[in-house]
Image (spheres, coloured by chain):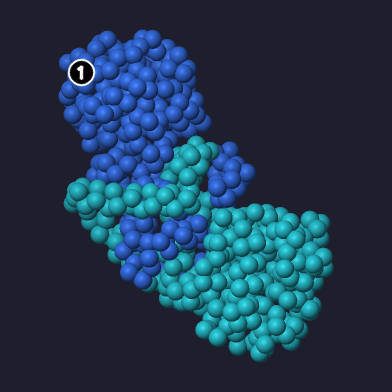
Chain colours: A cyan, B blue
Amino acid sequence: MFGRVAIIGIGLIGSSIARAVRARGLARHIAIADRSADHLERAEALGLGDSLHAGADAAVVGADLVVACVPVGACEEVAKLIARDLAPGAIVTDVGSVKGSVVRQMRPHLPAGIHFIPGHPVAGTEFSGPDAGFADLFDGRWCILTPPSDDVDADAIARLTAFWRALGSNVECMTPDHHDLVLAITSHVPHLIAYNIVGTADDLEAVTQSEVMKFSAGGFRDFTRIAASDPTMWRDVFLHNREAVIEVLGRFTEDLIALQRHIRWGEGDDLFELFTRTRAIRRGIIGMGQETPAADFGRRKG
Amino acid sequence: MFGRVAIIGIGLIGSSIARAVRARGLARHIAIADRSADHLERAEALGLGDSLHAGADAAVVGADLVVACVPVGACEEVAKLIARDLAPGAIVTDVGSVKGSVVRQMRPHLPAGIHFIPGHPVAGTEFSGPDAGFADLFDGRWCILTPPSDDVDADAIARLTAFWRALGSNVECMTPDHHDLVLAITSHVPHLIAYNIVGTADDLEAVTQSEVMKFSAGGFRDFTRIAASDPTMWRDVFLHNREAVIEVLGRFTEDLIALQRHIRWGEGDDLFELFTRTRAIRRGIIGMGQETPAADFGRRKG
């Protein structure tokens, strides 16, 4: 499918892509760059790439697909570093959870003749680093592509779409700004409130950490899993999707304060109405085949 | 272990207890009461009990263990209904997620000579009804017992403790008020914010329900599972644990607004500090053996 794929950053996502490209035979050569010597060493030990590079610039030489798998805040630096060495006609993409900021960071530095198509595979675990990746991470997941303007080469979009489909993903295109709003509600704000409640629990003087852990099966434990996600990646997500996160967070807080008022005044019917509505939404997700009741059972019991 | 166990309410928890008591041979007779004719019919079809009763009073006759498995708001009614028919020396317990209110609702109605020991198995799924239960729901979970005063018979506590251990649970005793604070942070407020964010998402005009569902793997999906829990049960939890929930919610909101301010002002170090701290707490939970990294992997991929 591609001659040389350059993967910049060999963490959870980068190493999963490397494994999947290898397993599914999608490139003749996998070039890996990472500025962490530890990561490169692990990548070598795990046999993730055909060539390993300390600098992103060396990795992209001759590559027809370049995938930046770095925290959102590092994208401008990567663009500056690789700009001179990109092959004409190469596709440059990324995997960041924020897209408007990535466009603003990278596009000004990329030369003409490069197909720049930011992307976001909506997949992950709370683990990090080259050892945490696995080849089927993207299987059955969605990957969102956000061509930054209408004049992006349709053939390049089709090739990148085919690449993600070959990794097992469904692909959808939307604008960077719409992506950032959708992800603010489906991912960024959920992560923020998970981080927040785990912090609130940690600060409660009257409840010990041991009690919080022991009795976490009542709901809290699901939040701790989300709140164990990579701190650097998530710091960058919030700093770089500030507007959409603050907008959604404002609505969330407004709604929460209304709920608190219902509780204070004993307005059970209003609580019941909301809880019934949210249950129906869950059934919609199960109905879409994104999750099965049986899998759920396993989860709650696990 | 017991002669006759009466289970009042044959929903998810009641039917799981019935199945576990049968599977582990913990009683000679299982008496089931439920005011829903549908539930009784399902209980009969599933063979959950030895006798089925429309009224809780009939079920408790001759029972040495009575377990109320009803929404917290129905406990007073159950206590009034069974009071006259309880056998002297019987243990009366429940499974509600709130304990102070259950004590206030039930104790005044129970006759002398009854051992009243409220309980709370910290286990569940988002499914409801007699069909949703399974025998190993309590396996490896915690059950909290809250004797309402210091003069509860130690032998009765020991017998109820042995019962829950036989169902596979770890048992811990604490006061009803402390229980309600611990569960406010580990369960009640997590549920409330899960319900809340699913509602907020549903109300966002600029994002379609289909988009929310498709891209829910980024964190939101875990919240929808929690927000699919039984509406009646949870309405009652919030109405009956009002003080602790509002106290914890106040701290949560305060912390969230501080986080929002960090995002607005680009204070990345403060975000990073919190996200690092919460990650360590998660590792503590895994370290306690409450969950394994491998099981997690399965979950996130599932």
Q: Is residue A222 left or right of residue A164?
A: left
Total labels drawn: 1
Quarter of the picture holding the N terminus of chain B: top left
Q: Amino acid at mark 1?
A: Asp
Q: Secondary structure at mark 1?
A: helix
Q: Which residue is mark 1?
A: B57
Q: Is residue A112 left or right of residue B85?
A: right
Q: Is residue A212 visible?
A: no
B171 w.r.t. A249: above or below:
above
- Local crowd at mark 1 within 10 Å, few (<14), some, or many (≥20)? many
Of the pair B27 and B171, the residue shown nearer to us: B27
Q: Is residue B101 visible?
A: yes
Between A106 and B129, the one nearer to me in the picture: B129
On what subunit does the disc labeled 1 rest?
B
User: Could you say where residue A140 lies in the image, as x and y percent from the top left?
Assistant: 56, 55
| Residue at x-position 59% and y-position 45% | B298
Above or below, A20 against B190 in this view is: below
Q: Residue B293's x, y, as percent?
A: 61, 45
Residue A246: % across, % down? 40, 71
On the image, the x and y values in percent for residue A87 come to: 75, 83
Which residue appears at 52% of the width and 84% of the height?
A150
Which quadrant would residue B186 be assigned to in this image? top left
Quarter of image, res B184 = top left
